[in-house]
Image (tube, rainbow, N blue to C red):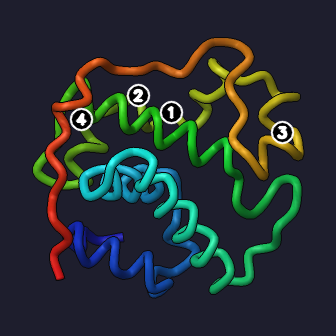
Amino acid sequence: MPNLGDDLFLERFESAQMPLDDMHHREHIKIAYLYLQRYPLNAAIERIRTSIKSFNAAYKVQEAPTSGYHETMTQAWMRLVHVTLCEYGPAANADEFYERSPQLSQKKILRLYYSADRFMSARAKTEFVEPDLAPLPTSSNLFNIVTKPLSQ
């Protein structure tokens, strides 16, 4: 997907104008970053949850054990993006943030924190469950995040 600019990218996602086939791991990380630039962590989690569910509904993505929205996956990734943002600061845009954060490009990284049984459980799909292999990282640099105003 060509670089649309952060605001247009987020607008296309939220309005389900972005083709489903263009939604890959990179796009999810960029969306997480953009919400964390605009909202505190808990509000950003709520926003991405609502937006992903709405996007999925617009494209009639089936809710099944291995498809559809996954709460633990969403929250774990939001927390990983959040700690990266806290520790290394924001970038000029979401693409630059993704490029300079190679650890976030590793789709399977959650395997370091979650056993397959816990991660694939029905409970983990519908509510956030804490990791059972290692705790998710945290940062004491919470004040490094500068929230950007919504551009509307």
Q: Residue furthest left?
A: 92
2 and 3 marks in contact (CB < 8 Å): no
Q: Say what amino acid the circle numbered 3 marks.
A: Met
**Left or right for 20, reference 35:** right
The numbered mark, 3 or 4, whose residue comes first in the sequence reads 4
Residue neighbourhood size for the residue with mark 1, other residues' Cα within 10 Å, grouped as few (<14), some (14–19), many (≥20): few
* Residue for badge 2: 103
What's the distance in space between the residues labelled 2 and 3, CA to CA?
A: 22 Å
Q: Position of residue 16 (x, y in %)?
A: 50, 84
* Residue for badge 4: 100
- Identify which residue is drawn at 78% across, 34% down: 119
What's the distance in space between the residues labelled 4 and 2, CA to CA?
A: 9 Å
Q: Say what amino acid the circle numbered 1 marks.
A: Gln
Residue neighbourhood size for the residue with mark 4, other residues' Cα within 10 Å, grouped as few (<14), some (14–19), many (≥20): few
**Left or right for 99, reference 69:** left
Q: Which mark is residue 120?
A: 3
1 and 4 marks in contact (CB < 8 Å): no
Q: In the rendered view, tell whether residue 109 sits above or below residue 56.
A: above
Write down the quadrant of residue 61 in the picture. bottom right
Q: Nearer the viewer, residue 139 or 97?
A: 139
State the quadrant of the N terminus. Answer: bottom left
What's the distance in space between the residues labelled 1 and 4, CA to CA?
A: 13 Å
3 and 4 marks in contact (CB < 8 Å): no
